[in-house]
Image (cartoon, rainbow, N blue to C red):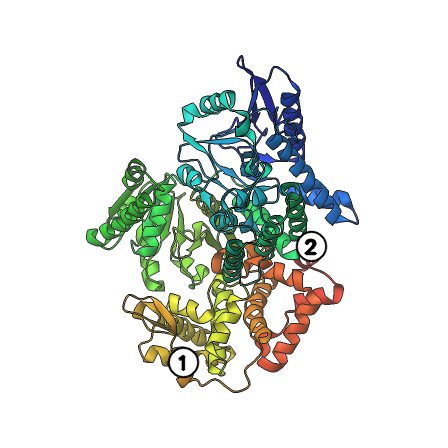
């Protein structure tokens, strides 16, 4: 079946429609590139064709490029992958340049055929780059419409001309939100940003595009950069205005990326260098920088984790082979912020929700939280009044457990107290049918122990949401010792329904995410106790690419929660407890009432409105900085390795079942160095031998918590890597 079809109407407009067979979303493949090229050639060569419209036969235009194309370019080039990628990218440039010039004489810029872009819904990446090459861009004014160039979010940048075209259209500073932040814009916002020209009613989309194409004048087809006298918006780099623009852009990129994301720097270099030359030379410069990024291990790791692995997990890579288990009616017990957040995302996904709390007033407060989230969505124009009304109508708030009758999944989100959770389990199961699945939302309590309160531990599972639920994309599913496949499938199907990313782990203390993030926090606090400058600790973490330094993170989660976890862990581990040095600092701050952001006092100082004002000056008085401060690299190795080694131990012990889940979970769950592709991706970039060398040095100077696990040491001896497969097999 054809991917691109072309049909010419009585007025002489050739409509080229994209419809990738067997897929709900168009992505550009090698075959698609060839078919689009042939369709454009045919339309330009046909004297009966007066104009061209490029559109989609699907509800959306495109989700982007099939990233497997890039991998196959490398493979086909054999010993010279850079040449393979560069040549492939230049072939794409030639196709889009052909659309842009549309048969016009390169000297007179006359004789071309108008090409309009008609986008019915979402367009990302290469889809938008195709649009930018057209002479006029039309999008449908509907809730599905989102237009953007989000490549930066998976470690690359728009490399099929999108970087060069868009920066020349609006200037580097105006282009920053789209190019450097990867923002996807709704129809009217896309027009305001200059990504599109016209926003029309969905039913008028093709008609409007055809009408413009038939009435277009020759000068309407000439792109600004092809016309004489073109000047870069914001000024060329060698002009006074342009110099300041690029200085500001460089500072902005460094501030946002901390220098650890190669794609952002490469993209700015492509824009800067391209602005010094003509358009076709600029495209070659863009292709060279794009090739450089694609051959960088960081970009490969980001693509693997944030695109390929994430997509595989969302499609059910870890799902047991059992029949469909979608949720039709959900019970949520506990209407606090967590429970209300779960109710909100479920209702938004079209699921009927029963929200239960101890009395009607508490249950109504939870429903009010859902209403507040919907009101915010309306304010931000993400939902209409009618859509919000439909969503809230799905949420029934009550203190009556009998209302759970008919629920096929219940998520309990009450206090982290085993006795309260056990009582809640028994009360809920008394109202549920025998096929219902019961899930507990807990971040620390062992699932296998909580399951003892259940009438059927095989249908009892942990579903750990991260706060705030409506913003955090990761959901950790915890299989207890007796949890059956039906419960795992139900949990995975539910997470898929609410459009979040699941990872499945086996039951163990702190599961996976908290098992890794707690050592990171404690290492940062331990460094304070050792007399390391707090600013060095925080900046070292941020320059690793962590979204928050460990001290800010503990302030956000609350210091008293850290104290509570520390006491419980010490009681469970006894003499093996490793974090006494960190406790000294945490307990002292808690005793002084410095509990973090919620008390407007913690490692940081806050104003009356709770806004962070900088590190608390009293820290340096209480724990004076030593004279011999460690180097930046040593602090970074401690902060990065202490959490990475926990991920390896989790794999080694069978808590983590799949390195893909380990990497995706780390990035989405606590923001582990996204540029690295996750802890296992980072170890592969380092190489196992270098990682063991770092561990041995840290262990000798700072203790056994840095000892290299046997799995990692064995990999080093064999020259193996995680994504090479050897380590996964050994585990």
Query: Is there any visible trace of residue 586 in the rendered image?
Result: yes
Q: Is residue 557 left or right of residue 176?
A: left
Mark 1 secondary-structure assignment: helix
- The part of the image, by quadrant, that contains residue 676 is bottom right
| Circle 2 Cα neighbour tier, 10 Å, few/some/many (<14 / 14–19 / ≥20) | few
- The part of the image, by quadrant, that contains residue 225 is top right
The dot on residue 303 is none
Query: Is there any visible trace of residue 574 in the rendered image?
Result: no
Locate residue 691, reporting x and y percent: 66, 68
Locate residue 486, reporting x and y percent: 48, 45
User: Who is closer to the viewer here, 494 or 501?
Assistant: 501
- Total marks shown come to 2
Q: Residue furthest front?
A: 229
User: Who is closer to the viewer here, 553 or 573?
Assistant: 553
Locate residue 537, reporting x and y percent: 50, 74
Q: Residue furthest top?
A: 10
Where 142 sits versus 660, above or below? above
User: Who is closer to the viewer here, 439 or 257?
Assistant: 257
- The residue depicted at 34 percent of the width and 68 percent of the height is 597
Mark 2 secondary-structure assignment: loop
Q: Which residue is disc 1 drawn over? A: 619
Q: Which residue is disc 2 drawn over? A: 725
| Circle 1 Cα neighbour tier, 10 Å, few/some/many (<14 / 14–19 / ≥20) | many
Q: Is residue 387 left or right of residue 543?
A: left
Mark 2 or 1: in front is 1
- The residue depicted at 42 percent of the width and 80 percent of the height is 585
State how far apart marks 2 and 1 are (Cα).
Answer: 46 Å
Q: Is residue 453 left or right of residue 548?
A: left
Name the image quarter holding the C terminus. Answer: bottom right
């Amino acid at each position: 079946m054809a991917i691109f079809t072309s049909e010419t109407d009585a007025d002489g407009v050739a409509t080229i429609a994209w419809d990738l067979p067997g897929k709900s979303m168009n992505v550009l493949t090698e075959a698609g590139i060839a078919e689009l090229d042939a369709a454009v050639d045919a339309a330009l060569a046909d004297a009966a064709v007066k104009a061209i419209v490029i559109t989609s036969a699907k509800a959306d235009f495109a989700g982007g490029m099939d990233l497997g194309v890039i991998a196959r370019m490398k493979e086909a080039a054999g010993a010279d992958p850079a040449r393979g990628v560069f040549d492939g990218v230049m072939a794409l440039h030639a196709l889009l340049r052909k659309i842009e010039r549309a048969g016009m004489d390169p000297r007179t810029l006359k004789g071309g055929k108008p090409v309009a872009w008609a986008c019915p819904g979402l367009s990302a990446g290469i889809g938008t780059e195709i649009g930018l090459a057209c002479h006029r861009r039309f999008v449908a004014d509907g809730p599905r419409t989102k237009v953007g160039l989000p490549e930066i979010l998976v470690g690359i940048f728009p490399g099929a001309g999108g970087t060069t075209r868009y920066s020349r259209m609006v200037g580097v500073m105006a282009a920053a939100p789209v190019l450097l932040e990867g923002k996807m814009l709704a129809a009217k916002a896309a027009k305001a940003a200059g990504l599109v020209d016209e926003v029309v009613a969905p039913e008028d989309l093709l008609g409007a595009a055809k009408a413009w194409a038939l009435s277009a004048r020759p000068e309407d087809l000439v792109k600004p950069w092809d016309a004489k006298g073109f000047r870069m918006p914001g000024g060329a780099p060698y002009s006074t205005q342009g110099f300041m623009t690029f200085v500001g852009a460089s500072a902005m990129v460094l501030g946002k990326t901390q220098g650890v994301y190669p794609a952002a720097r490469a993209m700015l270099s492509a824009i800067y260098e391209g602005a010094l030359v003509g358009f076709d030379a600029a495209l070659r410069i863009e292709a060279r920088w794009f090739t450089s990024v694609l051959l960088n291990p960081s970009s490969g790791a980001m693509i693997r984790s944030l695109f390929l692995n994430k997509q595989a997990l969302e499609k059910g890579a870890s799902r047991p082979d059992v029949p469909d288990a979608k949720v039709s009616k959900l019970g949520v017990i506990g209407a606090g912020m967590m429970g209300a957040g779960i109710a909100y995302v479920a209702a938004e996904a079209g699921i009927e929700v029963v929200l239960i709390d101890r009395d009607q007033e508490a249950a109504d407060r939870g429903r009010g939280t859902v209403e507040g989230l919907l009101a915010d969505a309306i304010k931000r124009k993400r939902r209409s009044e009618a859509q919000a009304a439909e969503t809230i109508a799905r949420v029934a708030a009550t203190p009556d457990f009998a209302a759970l009758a008919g629920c096929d999944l219940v998520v309990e989100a009450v206090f982290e107290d085993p006795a309260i959770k056990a009582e809640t389990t028994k009360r809920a199961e008394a109202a549920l049918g025998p096929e219902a699945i019961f899930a507990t939302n807990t971040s620390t309590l062992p699932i296998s122990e909580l399951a003892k309160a259940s009438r059927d531990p095989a249908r009892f599972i942990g579903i750990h949401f991260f706060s705030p639920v409506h913003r955090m994309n990761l959901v950790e599913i915890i299989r207890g010792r007796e949890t059956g496949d039906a419960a795992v499938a139900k949990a995975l199907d539910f997470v898929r329904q609410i459009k979040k990313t699941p990872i499945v782990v086996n039951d163990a203390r702190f599961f996976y995410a908290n098992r890794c993030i707690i050592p990171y926090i404690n290492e940062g606090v331990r460094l304070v106790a050792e007399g390391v400058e707090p600013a060095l600790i925080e900046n070292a973490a941020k320059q690793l690419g962590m979204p928050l330094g460990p001290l800010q993170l503990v302030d956000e989660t609350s210091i008293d929660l850290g104290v509570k976890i520390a006491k419980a862990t010490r009681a469970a581990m006894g003499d093996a407890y490793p974090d006494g040095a960190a406790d000294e600092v945490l307990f002292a701050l808690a005793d002084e009432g410095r509990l973090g952001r919620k008390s407007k006092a913690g490692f940081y100082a806050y104003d009356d409105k709770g806004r962070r004002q900088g590190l608390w000056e009293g820290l340096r008085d209480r724990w004076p900085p030593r004279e011999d401060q460690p180097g930046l690299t040593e602090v970074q190795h401690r902060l990065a390795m202490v959490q990475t080694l926990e991920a390896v131990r989790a794999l080694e012990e069978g808590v983590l079942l799949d390195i893909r889940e380990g990497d995706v979970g780390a990035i989405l769950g606590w923001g582990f160095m996204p540029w690295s592709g996750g802890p296992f991706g980072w170890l592969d970039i380092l190489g196992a031998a270098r990682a063991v060398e770092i561990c041995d040095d840290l262990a000798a100077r700072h203790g056994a918590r840095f000892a290299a696990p046997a799995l990692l040491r064995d990999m080093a001896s064999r020259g193996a890597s995680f994504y090479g497969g050897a380590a996964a097999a050994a585990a």
